[in-house]
Image (spheres, rainbow, N blue to C red):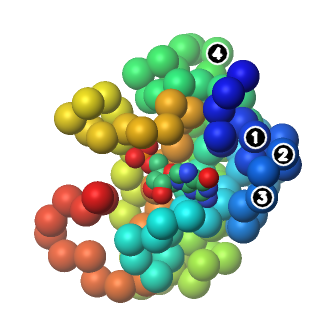
Amino acid sequence: MDCIFCKIINKEIPATIVYENDYVMAFDDAHPVAPVHTLIVPKKHIASMMELKEEDMVYVDEIHKAIQEVAKIKGVAESGFRIITNFGEDGGQTIHHLHYHLIGGKHLGPKIIHD
Ligand code: 5GP
Ligand code: ZN
């Protein structure tokens, strides 16, 4: 399958891996919008949050647990961070493998961010 995040998961292309277990991988975004910008992805190819099925809910659990781990590893567990998942044309999803942006390391303000 021609999916860049599947290739990162399969270690076919490099990424700076922050955390990984049997269900999820977290790696730094190639074009960070803040000092901390890490992507958390399920190891199963799920196209977006709108394609999540009942049997995929274990990944939702694991993604949330991984968010806590990544926040600690990146040193933003106390200072705070933002989680974003984009969907569809207006949401601006460009990679069609479910991913959650963990963004922090600076004060983000009230505006929605992600370019
Ligand atoms: P989206 O717009 O789909 O929500 O976010 C996709 C994100 O993936 C973007 O923030 C983009 O910078 C990041 N990205 C795209 N290609 C690569 C890549 O090959 N490696 C990494 N680490 N991040 C990527
Ligand atoms: Zn994929």
Q: Which residue is mark 3?
A: 14
Graded by Cα atoms within 10 Å as few (under 14), some (14 to 19) or many (20 or more), the crowding at tag 4 reads few
Q: Is residue 2 above or below residue 55?
A: below
Of marks 1 and 2, which one's residue comes earlier in the chain?
Answer: 1
Of marks 3 and 4, which one's residue comes earlier in the chain?
Answer: 3
Circle nearer the viewer, 4 or 1: 1
Q: Position of residue 38 (x, y in %)?
A: 55, 64
Amino acid type assigned to the residue bearing label 2 in the image:
Glu
Q: Which circle marks residue 70 in the picture?
A: none
Left or right of 38, for residue 93: left
Left or right of 109, for residue 55: right
Of marks 4 and 1, which one's residue comes earlier in the chain?
Answer: 1
Point 20% across, 35% down: residue: 90
Q: Position of residue 98 (x, y in %)?
A: 53, 35
Q: Secondary structure at mark 3?
A: loop
Q: CA distance from mark 1 to mark 3?
A: 9 Å
Q: Residue furthest left?
A: 110
Amino acid type assigned to the residue bearing label 3 in the image:
Pro
Graded by Cα atoms within 10 Å as few (under 14), some (14 to 19) or many (20 or more), the crowding at tag 1 reads some
Disc 4 + disc 1, Cβ < 8 Å:
no
Disc 1 + disc 3, Cβ < 8 Å:
no
Q: Which residue is mark 4?
A: 55
Q: CA distance from mark 4 to mark 1?
A: 23 Å
Asked whether residue 81 is in view, the answer is: no
Point 72% across, 61% down: residue: 15
Q: CA distance from mark 3 to mark 4?
A: 29 Å
The answer to which image quadrant residue 61 occupies is top right
Q: Which residue is mark 1?
A: 7
The answer to which image quadrant residue 114 occupies is bottom left
Q: Secondary structure at mark 2?
A: loop
